[in-house]
Amino acid sequence: MSNEQVKILWADDEIDLLKPHIMFLENKGYAVTAVSSGLEAIDEINSQDFDAVFLDENMPGISGLEVLSRIKSVKPSIPVIMITKSEEEAIMEDAIGSKISDYLIKPVNPNQILLSLKKNLDHSRLVSEKTTSNYQQEFRKIAMDLSMVNSYEEWADLYQKLIYWELELEDIEDVGMTQILESQKNEANSQFGKFIEKNYTNWFQPSSDAPLMSHNLFKEKVVPELSNKQPTFLVVIDNLRYDQWRAFEPTVNNYYKKASESSFYSILPTATQYARNAIFSGLMPSDMEKLFPQYWKNDTDEGGKNMHEEDFLREQLKRLGLTHISYTYNKITNLKAGKKLVDNFKSLKDNDLNVVVYNFVDMLSHSKTEMEVVKELASNDKAYRSLTKSWFKNSPLLEMIQLSQQLGFKLILTTDHGTINVSAPTKVIGDRDTSLNLRYKTGRSLTYQDKDVLAIKDPKSIHLPSITMSSSFIFAKNDLFLAYPNNFNHYVSYYRNTYQHGGVSLEEMIIPFVVLDPK
């Protein structure tokens, strides 16, 4: 906001004594209207627009606080800077409770006045400029890092940096900066795809340096947190991206303090039937198929693919020698089930471990494909985060977290995989037994664009089941989705700019694991 545009109302019963201050502001280009009583101030507010008000707290007749209340009733968003001789705490509290923007103690000097104006009128611009300049510096560093990143730890760190800047730039008006960040994210995903192509298979070799992945998460991270002295509340939010966790983290922090936060890698495919079953079973999919054929279903099999997580969990606890652990397992797929668990939450306090799988974010991403209204509401990542945050703040899940804090539970928050907003198709041809997912396919005789996918000819090499002897897997990279040539244009227009998962991207694979203690 340039000074020429800024109109200020100054109300003080000793306005004549403030002439030097007013002249100082006018010399800086501000337009100042000076009045000597509260009633005059209210008349001016009713008759014209001002950008800010300086208001003396102690005026004869109608008090400054009363004037403040009347100003806020007609112009609630206008910044009011209260000026007073008094340092009495009660007056300050009243003023702050009435939503003043700033508070100055007499005698004030001109620079204080100017600083207060800048703080209140130019705040968003100044923050925006500072954020932009900081990101410009960081941009060069990230660009250099991108050319050198060569380990799963470095990739997790770089992804965190990108999320940090995405959230920092979210509210500033510089569209150019946001576009630069987007192009940096795309470049990062392109390099990450090459990194996964080169390293993913090796992670399953004996004694290889591999990241913590879905199938080891429970044993390595959850079990050490279990104690018979304090119940643990494990919440797995299906399809939660790191940036979405960052969006509602401040709400969780009202009730819990963070003991630790780390990231882990989802296995491929980054899809619920594979990644979440891997968490609860402590096994890779080919082992689940071999050891528990009664619980495992392949992509082409009829029926639900996630019906046996509780069974898998029971078998894993048995295998780890933890049969003495008392636990519950609840899967929440609708509001009614969430409210029911809230109503019965106190009954969980005698268990060592209470697991809740919460399925809202996944439903949100899938409904974006099917419902125009959700397409509008979650048109990009910023809107998608905002929608997740709004849901969380009004959900039974937040009530559960509040109750678990009151009961003194340890809280663990995590997910099975993330998701990515897909923007471009890549053609694939398969037979009628090919799986239907848009970010990965498994089947015989798949034909595809080599550069667009990670192709695994031998599923056993990454511990995935083979549906037939000649089955292979392909995983889409970057923000691509797999589309069949027949009816191509309709298919593309339907799925473009929807949230999908199953493939290779930072957003799908690098996901949070957070341990929190009750406040």
Image (cartoon, helix red, strand yellow):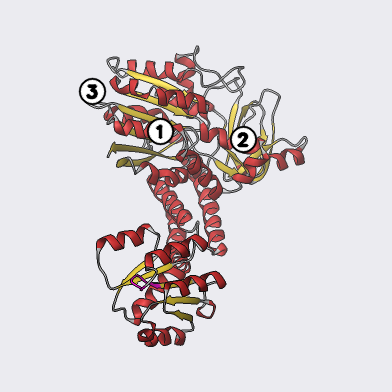
- Measure how far apart labels 2 and 1 are at the Cα level: 24 Å
| Residue lying furthest top | 294
At horizontal 32% and vertical 29% (from top left) the residue drawn is 222
Would you identify the image quadrant in which residue 207 lies? top left
Q: Quick check: is 262 in the magenta stretch? A: no
Q: Secondary structure at mark 1?
A: helix
Crowding at dot 3, Cα within 10 Å, few <14 / some 14-19 / many 20+, comes out as few
Task: Give the extent of the magenta segment.
Answer: 55-60
Q: Residue at x 61, y 35 (%)?
A: 367
Between disc 3 and disc 2, whose residue precedes?
A: 3
**What residue is at 71 percent from the left and 39 percent from the top?**
494
Type of the residue with mark 3: Asn
What residue would you read off at disc 2? 367
Secondary structure character of the magenta stretch overall: loop
The kind of residue tagged 1 is Glu
* Callout 2–callout 1 Cβ contact below 8 Å: no
Is there CB contact under 8 Å for labels 1 and 3? no
